[in-house]
Structure formats: structure tokens, C-alpha cells
Amino acid sequence: MPSDPLSPEESLAALIEGLELDGEDADSDAGVQATAELVARLRGNGAPLTLSAGLEERLAGLAGDAPAAVWTLFEPDTVAQCHALSVASGADVVVANTLEPLDALVSDEGVDPEGLLVTGALLAAHAAAPFSLGAVRLGTEDPACLGRLSSEAACLGINGVLLAGVATPKDAARAVAALTPGLPVVLLPDTDGWEAAPDPGAWRVSGDVVALGVEAPLSEALGITERDAPSVRDAGLGWVVRGDVAAVAPEQCAVALRRLYDAGATAAGLSGPVTPAHSLALRDACDAS
């Protein structure tokens, strides 16, 4: 990372100026239509979706131990380039590069959580994909920091929020309550939380929750999907997977992803050491489903 990075405030101001945003909801009709289409497809009404690849491994390779989310504030151009690569590789939905535990970032990196989430959402929304999601990995940080992200969602251009690492339905309810009503939510409980309460009704804490899902190593995510996605889909919700491809060859990944979509996943993305071959396998599996 550069020796003289922009401050968070300078970074956000430069992004807003560069993207020619004026604080108004740009092309709001198109945004409303895109959000409605995303919700329909997440729920299984239409073609399944692919999510952009997680950037943790890619950015870690560029700057040692710096958390990937910190790049969102201090190197937004690099994050934008990574999002563009995901779109070129076939991503339908760009997920903001803010899926690091907020409490750790606040304590270890001195990051302003609201500025991080807003900047990440802005970068995701302007990545030229059909859809975008703000993203938060919940920890012990007060979910009130979600308020600005959701209240400015239309201006930022995002179509919803992905909440990951949710430990319990009570935590999910607390986080969703901090969001502006009407913003679609994709809820990914942590695996322990989901195994403790694998009931879609327990996690449907608001009508804004449009999809549930899982984050896990790809083979584990496949097993959970084959077991639980049918009941979630029967409840009228979508099923979203983020599968870690560590030690998974692209050929194995392709087979697992086809089974994933066949089992009822409405959207899938990859994390870990994602290569172009992995991204191509994801796109091909989605198109074949």
C-alpha cells in the first residue's frame, strides 16, 4: 500500500467527485427495477445468479497482512479493478469488499465503520454489474453503523445488503432492525448458528429478508445445500452460497457448483484462492443450471 494513503474522508470525497454523484438518487426508476429483478431471482424466480469473488486472498497477496476491507478506504482504485475483473469473469452481483469483522477493524485498524461500509457499497455499485450488494460481517460492533449504509442505499446505487457471520436469529433481528425498512437483505448465518437453528422461519426476522444461505468450504457448503436448501426454498426464500475453494481444483469446483445449483442454490460465489479458472467454472455451472 502507498506510504501516503488517502484518509477515509478524502477517499470517499474523491470517489463521489470521480463518479459525479450529487447526492440525488440517480436513475431511481432503473434502480428500483433492478432491485425488484434481483429479489425475484434470489427467490428463484428467474435465472440463478453468480456473486463476485471474495477479495481477501487476492488483496492479501499484494500487501502482506493488511485486511482486505482496509483497501476499500485507502486503495479504492485497486478494489475497483478487482471488481471489474469479477464482472469480466461473469459476476452478476458485485458484493462490497467489506466482509471483515467490523469490531476487529475498528479496534485494530482504527477504521470508521460507517465510512468503510458506504465506500465499499459505492465501489460495488459502480462496477458495471447488473446488481450490487453492500456487505457486512457482523461481530460485536453495534449494528447501528448499518444505518447510514441503508439510508443512503438508493443514492449509492446498491440493490440490497448481505449480512454474513450472523450467530443467532436474535442477532439477525437486531441487525435487520438497524437497516432502513424496504432494503432487501441476504442473510448468511455462520455454520454453527445455522446448525443450531436450521429453521427458515427462525431466521426470517423481517419481510425484508429475501434469502438465507451459508459460508463454508465448498464441499461442506454443498452438503448443507443439498440437505437444507429445499426447505428454505419451500419457505419462499432464496438460498445463497459463498464457498471457499482452498485446495479445490477448478475441475472439482465445476462438479460441486453444478450440484450446488441443482440442489436449489439461487446464487453462488467463491472465496479463498479464486483463480480465473474457478470463476469460469462458476459461470458455466450457473449457465448450465
Image: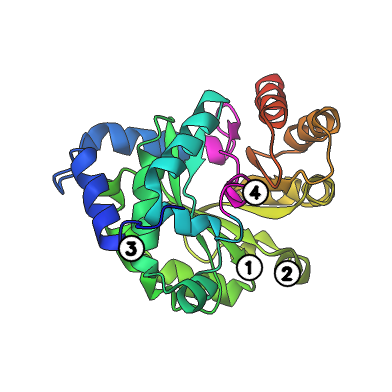
Say which label, 4 or 2, has the lower sequence index.
Answer: 4
Q: Which residue carries the number 2 mark?
A: 197
Residue 33 percent location from the top left of the image? 34, 33
Q: Which sits earlier in the primary sequence, circle 2 or circle 3?
A: 3
Q: CA distance from mark 4 to mark 1?
A: 33 Å
Between residues 145 and 161, which one lies in front from this camera angle?
Answer: 145
C-alpha separation, residue under disc 4 versus residue under disc 2: 30 Å
Q: Are marks 2 and 1 in contact (CB under 8 Å)?
A: yes
- Foreground residue among 269 and 192: 269
Task: Give the magenta range.
Answer: 41-63
Q: Secondary structure at mark 4?
A: helix
Task: Find residue 124 and report its image quarter.
Answer: top left
Give whichever of discs 4 and 1 has the lower sequence position: 4
The spot of residue 205 in percent (x, y) is 52, 66
- Residue 114 can be seen in this image: yes
At 37% from the left edge and 34% from the top edge, which residue is drawn? Answer: 34
